[in-house]
Structure formats: structure tokens, C-alpha cells
Amino acid sequence: NKYDSIFCLTDFEREKYHWLGAKGSKTQLVPNAIKLDTQVANSNILEQHNLTGKRIILFMGNLNFVKRADLLLDAMPEVLEKIPNAVAVLAGNDEGESQLINETAKKLGIENSYKWVGPVYGNDKRTLFQAAEFFVLPSDHDSFPVVLLEAMSYSKPIISTNTIGGKSIVAEEINGLLDSRGNVSELAKAIIRLLENEELRTELGQNAYQIAKQKYDIKVITDKIETTFYSLIKAKAQ
């Protein structure tokens, strides 16, 4: 017990430390933080990729076997039956999955209903977040994906798998929807539900922004860290 405090990202992580013998009073829940973005987007990325007027389902993350962007494509045929102008937009670096993504799109016949735009930054990233209907992250594993906090800061509802990170950030029917890992049918139904229900999208999006602001804004988190350090310093001085 040669420690004064342990910072934990999630309740799950905190419980693991308790199981290992850490005292509950010495563990602090300190999640990742984001800076809320108030800038107006100024980019032509939508025009560059022929996305103007499309209903954008946004995935943002590296294309790898963990993030499972391929599952979003697998869900698209069912989605397109109900919402023909929906388009899956994938943004991120290729980590060996782009060939699989392209082959999946071709096999499913949805080449015109998905776009991989590569990594995005600054105004391009801001534009995609603002233009998206909602954000989808169908990962198999995640500890605490900051990209979900980013999407929430743009008032976007979340569809995520019920990973440790997903469950730590997304409250079912509050700021998003959770589905089972690898379940394409559940994912498709969640996407269709949000696309068809503007009132629900708006409600979940507004809740998402408030949660991001109240729980994950960088000032909130830094204040919590500073308070912990000051209390430890004071205790040591006594």
C-alpha cells in the first residue's frame, strides 16, 4: 500500500483495484476529458466526397480488427431498405482493414452508400461531426474511447457495443443505444430507429451534450485532479 491515490478511468477498473486489495477511499474515478468545441465548421469535405444531402452515419477511428467498422457495413443493406439516402462514413487511419472494408462493401452491393475519407483533423473533423445524424462505434473491445466524448460534445447520440468503455459512457436511452458485440441485426435496428425518429435523436443528442459538459469537460476533470492533489499535499503536511 505504498500509494496515496489511484486514478481509475472507469468503475470497472476501480472495482478491479478493490479486488486486488486497494482501499476504496484511495481510488478516484477520473475519466478522460475533452475540450468542448464551439467553432463553426468551415470545410468542403462533404462536397469532396459527394455527401451533401446524405444522412450520414459516422464512424471515426482506426480501421482495425478491434474497432469493427466492417460490422457497420454489414448492417447497411437492412438500413438502406428503409432509408435509401443513408451513407456510412468511415474516418480514420488504415491499420490493415481497408481491403476488407472495400471487399465487404462490394460483396454487399453498397459501394455507393459508404465512404472511407481517411484520417480527418480540424475543420474536416468538425464538419463531419456536425453533419452526422449520430455516431456509431461497433468495437469488440474498448477501455474508454475518447471519440465517444467528442461526438457527445457535438450533441450526437451514440450507438455503441456494450464494451467496458461503451457501458461506462453510454446510458441506454439517455444519451445513446447499446447493442451486443458482433450483433449486426441489433446494430441495424438501432440505426434505423434513430434515423426514423427525429424526436429521439434530438433528445439523446441534447442529453449527450449535457453529460459531456457536466462530466467530461476538461475543466471539470482538471479541477477534480487538482482537488485530489491538494488534499494529498495537505494530508502529508500535517
Image (cartoon, rainbow, N blue to C red):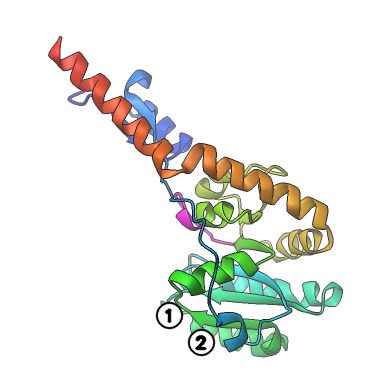
Q: Residue furthest top?
A: 238
At x 66%, y 90%, the residue is 106
At x 55%, y 52%, the residue is 153
Residue 138 is inside the magenta segment: yes
Q: Specify the amino acid type for callout 2.
A: Gln
Say whether residue 229 is left or right of residue 35.
left
Q: Is disc 2 placed on a helix, strand or loop?
A: helix
Residue 68 position (above or below residue 110): above
At x 71%, y 62%, the residue is 187
Say whether residue 90 is left or right of residue 50.
left
Where does label 2 land, which residue?
99
- Horizontal and vertical percent position of residue 62: 45, 71
Could you tell me what secondary structure mostly forms the magenta stretch? loop
Q: Specify the amino acid type for callout 1.
A: Gly
Front in this rendered view, residue 12 or 116: 116
Q: How many marks?
A: 2
At x 61%, y 86%, the residue is 47
Say whether residue 7 is left or right of residue 70.
left
Residue 51 position (above or below residue 151): below
Determine whether label 2 and label 1 are within 8 Å by CB: yes
- In this picture, which residue range is highlighted in magenta? 137-147
- Horizontal and vertical percent position of residue 229: 25, 27
Mark 1 nearby-residue class (10 Å; few <14, some 14–19, many ≥20):
few
Residue 206 position (above or below residue 7): below
Q: Where's the N terminus, which quadrant?
A: top left
Where does label 1 land, which residue?
96
